[in-house]
Image (cartoon, grey):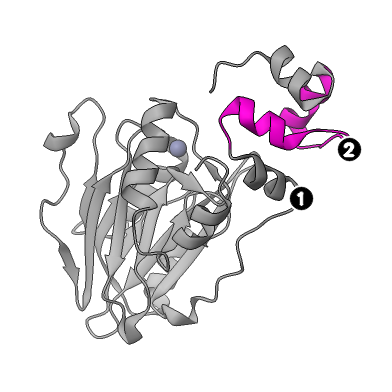
Amino acid sequence: MSGVSPAAAAAVAGISESELATLEAAGTIPEKINLPELGKILGLHPQKLAALASGWLPSPKKLSGWRELRMFTTRSDELAVNCYLVWDSATRGAALFDTGLDARPILETIAAGGLVLKHIFITHSHWDHVEALPAIRAAFPNAQLHSGSPNVPVNQRNLPDKIVRLGELSISHRATPGHAVDGVTYLVSHWPQSAPAVAFVGDAIFAGSIGRGNQSWEVARQKVREEILSLPLETLICPGHGPMTTVAEEVESNPFF
Ligand SMILES: [Zn+2]
């Protein structure tokens, strides 16, 4: 990402190149490593990087504040991917954010709650986030699909230009490319009991990290800073992989910022 050679990175960190390779591959941290210096040369915040290496995690989130919000983590052999369902308790209308790998737990929750899926929002079109889309669409052919589409400029995509309402809830979007050219973050606000807004970010940002800059590392980092970390500090961040976090926790602890 930063264009620094492994030899240069290992040298400032005070470890061998093979130790650096093991760290990158397995997360094994050599005892004598100088993480703050490694962070500096890589463009990562030195103290935040060191804190992350000593086990920082976002606090566990109690979803009781957002009663109509569910997280689904579906797994394959190599990875685990999150998707999320929200609904309005009065109208029973629901919205799904990405589909994950398996439609079954989502469809079961929809059926058990007597919900009707009205909207499907896609954060980006990487396969692990849309694998179950055909099954979901077959079950709810009338659900409206919202996504950025690759090969089309950001300002011409088939995203709602207005706020989408789901009963009391309102859903807006902001472009967060960088990890994927069609990266979009959706923001759901006006929850009952004034629960904080929830941002569905796909792979733009993770707890303590960011998604790989497939399109551009620079754009990825800049969009997260401008479009996500500028949200109110209490905003709940729901990433495509790993635990939920908040804007406050990422501002304080994410070494990319
Ligand atoms: Zn992705």
Is residue 25 shown above or below 85? above
Measuring 89% from the left and 37% from the top, which residue is drawn there?
Answer: 31
In-image side of 75 versus 132 (left or right)? right
Residue closer to the observer: 175 or 118: 175
Residue toward you, 226 or 112? 226
Q: Is residue 74 above or below residue 194?
A: above
Range of the magenta residues?
18-44
Q: Which residue is mark 1?
A: 54
SS of the residue at dot 1? loop
23 inside magenta stretch? yes
* SS category of the residue bearing label 2: loop
Q: Is residue 222 visible?
A: yes
- Identity of the residue drawn at 38% across and 65% down: 85
Vertical side of 243 occupied by 197: above or below: below
Give residue 228's position: percent from left, percent from top.
36, 51
Name the residue beneath numbered marker 2.
31
Residue 197 horizontal/vertical position (percent):
34, 68
- Mark closer to the chain start, 1 or 2: 2
Residue 88: x, y in percent?
28, 78
Q: Residues within 10 Å of mark 2 (few under 14, many from 20)?
A: few
Name the residue at 70% across, 20% down: 9
